[in-house]
Amino acid sequence: HVQLVESGGGSVQAGGSLGLSCAASGSILSINAMGWYRQGPGNTRELVATISSGGSTNYADSVKGRFTISSNNAKNTVYLQMNSLKPEDTAVYYCNANALTMKNAGWSRDDYWGQGTQVTVYS
């Protein structure tokens, strides 16, 4: 069983900054990649940023230059620093991890999700 615990988030005025963190725990052999997704009111869940175990990053165009994703592989933790926040960044932010774990049938690579944390940006 893998658990992702998120922290951070909250409310901030437009132009401000917030940071998110997410720690993965459980019977993890390795993590291929971690990332952040978000779901705003009335919207589908969308990718914000991902980072591979090797440090390669990928960002949604809407956050490039404002958000920075980083990770600590030894701690199975991923971070998201969000600067120059806009009202349209308001959403529930979800942590994701693609992890290799041991299951009854053997090793399995699956996607795991955190419970989500609310980010609200007001103008």
Image (cartoon, rainbow, N blue to C red):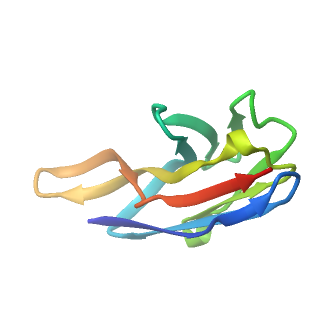
| Residue 47 percent location from the top left of the image | 57, 35
In the image, 62 versus 121, the foreground residue is 121
Q: Position of residue 7 (x, y in %)?
A: 57, 71
Q: Would residue 53 be found to the left or right of residue 4 on screen?
A: right
Residue, x 45% and y 57% (percent of image)? Answer: 30
Between 20 and 73, the one lying in front of the other is 20
> Residue at the left extreme?
104
Q: Nearer the viewer, residue 108 or 93?
A: 93
Q: Can residue 114 be seen at all in this image of the molecule?
A: yes
Q: Is residue 56 visible?
A: no
Residue 44, percent from left and from top: 45, 31
Q: Quick check: 66 left or right of 31?
A: right
Query: Residue 81 in the image: x percent, y percent?
Result: 77, 58
Could you tell me which residue is drawn at 33 percent across and 45 percent down? 109
In this rendering, the answer to whether 10 lies above or below 119 is: below
**52 left or right of 111?**
right
Image quadrant of residue 8?
bottom right
Residue at 36% x, 67% y: name it.
3
